[in-house]
Amino acid sequence: MAQLPTKAQILALLRDEPMTGSRLRGALGLPKKLKLSFKQLLAEMVEDGTLNRTCHKEYRLSEKEPGTENLKVKDNRRPGARSRRQETLVEKTNRSMRGVLHQIDEERFFVTDLETGREYPMAHRKTPPGKDGEKISFVLYPHPKMKHSFLAKVDTNAMLQEISWNDVKKAFIKDSNLPLNFSKEIQEFVEKQNAPSAKDIKGRVDYRSLPILCIDPKGAEDHDDAVSVEILPDGFKLGVHIADVSHYVPEGSALDSEALSRSYTQYLPWTAVPMLPEKLSGDLCSLHEGVDRLAFTCMMRLNKKGEVLEYEFQKSVVHVKSAISYEYAMELLENKDPDILALATVARLLRANREKNGILELISTEYGCEFDEAGEPVKLVPRSNVESNSWIEECMLIANNCCAKELTKRKLQGIFRIHEAPDTKDIMELYYLLPDLFKDAPIHIRELGKPRRGDSNLNPDVFALYKHLVKRAGTDDALMMRILRSMQKAHYDSNSFGHFALNWQDYSHFTSPIRRYADLWCHRELSRSGKNIKAERVNSVIEVCDLISGNEIKNQKIERLSLKVCSAWLLQKHIGESFEGTVSGIEQWGIFVSIKEPMAEGLVRFRDIAGDDYYIFNPDQGIVFGKRSGKTFRRGDKVLVRLLRVNPLRGEADFSIERKLSSEKSSKVVSKNPEKDAKRTASRSSRRKR
């Protein structure tokens, strides 16, 4: 026989949300015949101050009830879209509960609340929410079909607060499908490799007496390039010495196949997943200071203007005189170190020659992450970009240029780095979105013609236009990113079709064989002579180009995501706080906002914009506008945002916009009827798809 519930049971149910008497009776499963008795019990609880009754005829906990003085009961009703209230993560976690998970069958689960002992079913799912008997954090939500009933779901936000940084790193490696170890066969092969012997050195050009410098970022472990500069009466002798990885990685071996499969060393803020085993990448192939190493040298003779008169590729042996950081190289420059002065002089001449032909520099701020002694992220910081970076860059660029010319001249099956000119359609889209960038442009869009002419990606007209756009963008990272998105992506090809951004017809990769497979391939090709030139390759050059180009895109995404993971980890302690942010991008699914301290970017869904407006995305103008208020958001707007939730496992952060602070001057006149424009755009998109 059914009995009235105890006061404790009623209080436990109302602890989550206020309820009307009929809904409360249904949730407790009381029959209709107990309706009057139950109403009398509720009236007594209101009279003695245990409960309060609202103007909506709902019962809620009284603030006088012991243990509820600081308890904020959230109104959990499901209001209409117009009056939907914005919730913060702080409010949601107040409803998070702990329980034990139980499995009924393969797809059915329920959870038992540890506090009240009540059981709540979970939605049917093919992926188990956890193991049977496991303790989880969960929240309740109304059953979509059964009135006055609730379903439980795992509270991922509460669960995320319990994970450690090591758990995040392990999960990231697993989700990214990054290979951590090498096979036993490869490890056994690598263990047999030794430092260069007299037999290995025989027949190589000996450059051990040269003042060779290795300049890398602080903490770098794989040193695959070094440079030497000799001053001649009529110019300079520039040597670019690259680790001879091909000596240790036989073509067609298991190690070669694994290196091709990885294609690159995957750099993460907290570690690196190498393309080659540690003994090779960090030791035998690495050009360490004070030891003999096998190298592949591009020796170039330059005139006094820094122009390349002749070059030669040689198998060599080197002995690095000094391995220093970029920052220390600048100190040596101030102290007028002769070797550093010679290198700086040559690099500046090489850059001046590139500037004569045109340089397209899309400068954007790159970020790294600093870690504490325990290995946890502390803050995101801009990566240093001192002048000595450009010294090495200029030397590597000219060596890669010579490599491509040599491959073409000898008709070898080289792998070339090509970059196509931007498509006219993408240029038009950029013009419509940011017309101010095109002000006083040296050429009109209608005069551009075809982006590609014959077998060359070089296009002087488009190049001149993009030089103008980059100059107009200045130091604005967001504008620079927009320009970058309008350009094609560089990739690998078996033909030398040219590199648009460098404005060079011949460009390949030669200088980083420890961390890029394309460079290793080019080393092997340059080593061919006589009958070996036409010998069959183990792998097809076309298939290799497709594979490494695809892996490059994947690795770049993983690298960007890993930095977002660090950013999200730092944001965890700031949930519920407000920040001044800048709108960095707008898409049809929401507004991206960046904040400076801590450095991070997150998403604001349209439903998380304060107020009861309905927002529409206009892709033509790159804005979001409120249907009722006409309020707009565009890139560059300053906004006050609140951090709602963070997921460090996925590198995600969600914000809400509390209010708009200010905006940049619009570079485009906003339509008087943005809703009509949005519909017109959707119609045009539909016709294009058909």
Image (cartoon, helix red, strand yellow):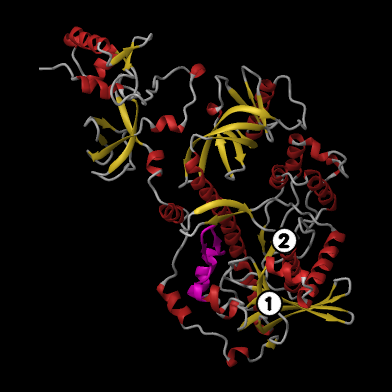
Q: How many badges with numbers are in the image?
A: 2
**Residue at 79% over, 70% down:** 344
**Residue at 69% over, 69% down:** 328
Classify mark 1: helix, strand or loop: helix
Quadrant of residue 244 within the rendered picture? bottom right
Q: Earlier in the sequence, mark 2 or mark 1?
A: 2
Classify mark 2: helix, strand or loop: loop
Any magenta on residue 272? yes
- Front one among 318 and 418: 318
* Residue 613 x/y as whole percent: 57, 20
* CB-based contact (under 8 Å), mark 2 and mark 1: no
Q: CA distance from mark 2 to mark 1?
A: 33 Å
* Residue 471 x/y as whole percent: 81, 47
Please give left or right for residue 495 compared with residue 118 in the image: right
- Front one among 188 and 15: 15
Q: Foreground mark, 2 or 1?
A: 2
Residue of label 1? 526
Please give left or right for residue 597 compared with residue 448 in the image: left
Residue of label 2? 386
Report the magenta residues as a range: 253-279
Q: Is residue 334 above or below residue 678?
A: below
Q: Which mark is residue 148?
A: none
| Amino acid type assigned to the residue bearing label 1 in the image | Leu
Please give left or right for residue 180 compared with residue 515 in the image: left
